[in-house]
Image (cartoon, grey):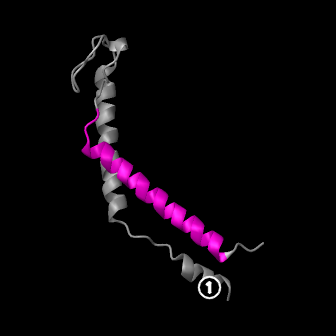
Amino acid sequence: MRVSFSNTVEKQIKLEWDNKHLLEWMTDIIVKPQPLYPSNTHWGGSVNQREAPVKSSLNADFRWRELERITKENYKLLKWLQGKKSSMDVIKWEIERWR
């Protein structure tokens, strides 16, 4: 079964758009600080960003360190992805496929 050229190009365009959207989303997450504990009634009202919640847990320190580790890894991944150029040339693939 052969896939039409236009169908492949449409998939490539959608993939490129999705990748761009994902990178923008990751950049927004890193650039705009997110509250660690959003203010809600569960924690007893307003809580500042890096302030401990009203109710504490036994593993809060571990969770905080894990959050910092994941954030650093995500930042490294974002920088790596932003530095990469597209290695796919759909038109070249289609030309070679039809030969």
Q: Is residue 45 above or below residue 29?
A: above
Front-most of residues 66 and 4: 4
| Residue identified by numbered label 1 | 96
Q: Is residue 1 above or below residue 48?
A: below
Q: Does any portion of residue 78 appear in the rendered image?
A: yes
Left or right: 7 in relation to 15? right
Left or right: 4 in relation to 39? right
Residue 23 lies within the magenta run:
yes
What residue occupies the far right of the structure in this picture? 1
Q: Does any portion of residue 57 appear in the rendered image?
A: no
What residue occupies the far bottom of the structure in this picture? 99
Residue 21 lies within the magenta run:
yes
Residue at the spot 68% in from the left edge and 85% down from the top edge: 98
- Which image quarter is the C terminus in? bottom right
Q: Which residues are magenta?
A: 5-34
Left or right: 59 in relation to 7? left
Residue 27, position in %: x, y?
31, 50
- Residue type at tag 1: Glu
